[in-house]
C-alpha cells in the first residue's frame, strides 16, 4: 500500500541499492542521482560494508512513503 522504498540492481562488478526517498535519510547514502529524492549505495566485492549503517538506512526507508511506479 505504501509503495517501494528501495530496489537492488545486480551488475557484474557491484550491487546498486536504490533508495527512492534517499535524500530523506540520515546520513545521506553516498551516491547521487539525477532525480532529486533518489540516493544510491554501490557495493563492490572489495568494499567493507558498514552493516549497521546499511540496516539503519533500510529501516528509515521503510518508514517513509514509498515510490509508486506506474
Image: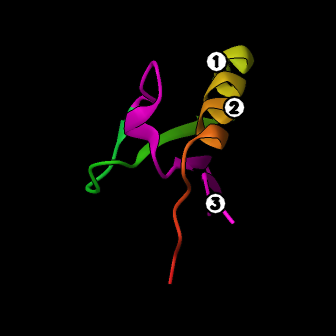
Q: CA distance from mark 2 to mark 1?
A: 10 Å
Question: Marks 1 and 2: in contact by CB < 8 Å?
Answer: no
- Indicate the position of residue 19 as horizontal and vertical percent values: 52, 46
- The one of 48 and 68 positioned closer to us in this rendering: 68
* Residue extending furthest toward the front: 1
- Judged by depth in the image, the label closer to the viewer, 3 or 1, is 3
> Element at badge 1?
helix
Whether residue 62 is in magenta: the answer is: no
Q: Quadrant of residue 58?
A: top right
Q: Mark 1 sits on what residue? A: 53
Please tell me which residue is depicted at 41% across the width and 29% down the height of the picture: 30
- Indicate the position of residue 27 as horizontal and vertical percent values: 45, 18
N-term-proximal mark, 3 vs 1: 3
Q: Mark 2 sits on what residue? A: 59
| Residue 64: mark | none
Q: Name above or below for residue 32 compared with residue 27.
A: below
> Element at badge 2?
helix
Q: CA distance from mark 3 to mark 2?
A: 14 Å
N-term-proximal mark, 2 vs 1: 1
**Can residue 20 be seen here?**
yes
Please tell me which residue is depicted at 61% across the width and 31% down the height of the picture: 60
Q: Mark 3 sits on what residue? A: 2
**Quadrant in the picture for the N terminus:** bottom right
* Residue extending furthest toward the bottom: 70
Amino acid at each position: 500500500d505504501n509503495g517501494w522504498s528501495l530496489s537492488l540492481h545486480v551488475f557484474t562488478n557491484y550491487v546498486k541499492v536504490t533508495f527512492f526517498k534517499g535524500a530523506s535519510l540520515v546520513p545521506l547514502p553516498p551516491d547521487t542521482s539525477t532525480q532529486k529524492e533518489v540516493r544510491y549505495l554501490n557495493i563492490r566485492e572489495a568494499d567493507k560494508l558498514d552493516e549497521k549503517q546499511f540496516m539503519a538506512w533500510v529501516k528509515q526507508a521503510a518508514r517513509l512513503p514509498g515510490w509508486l511506479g506506474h
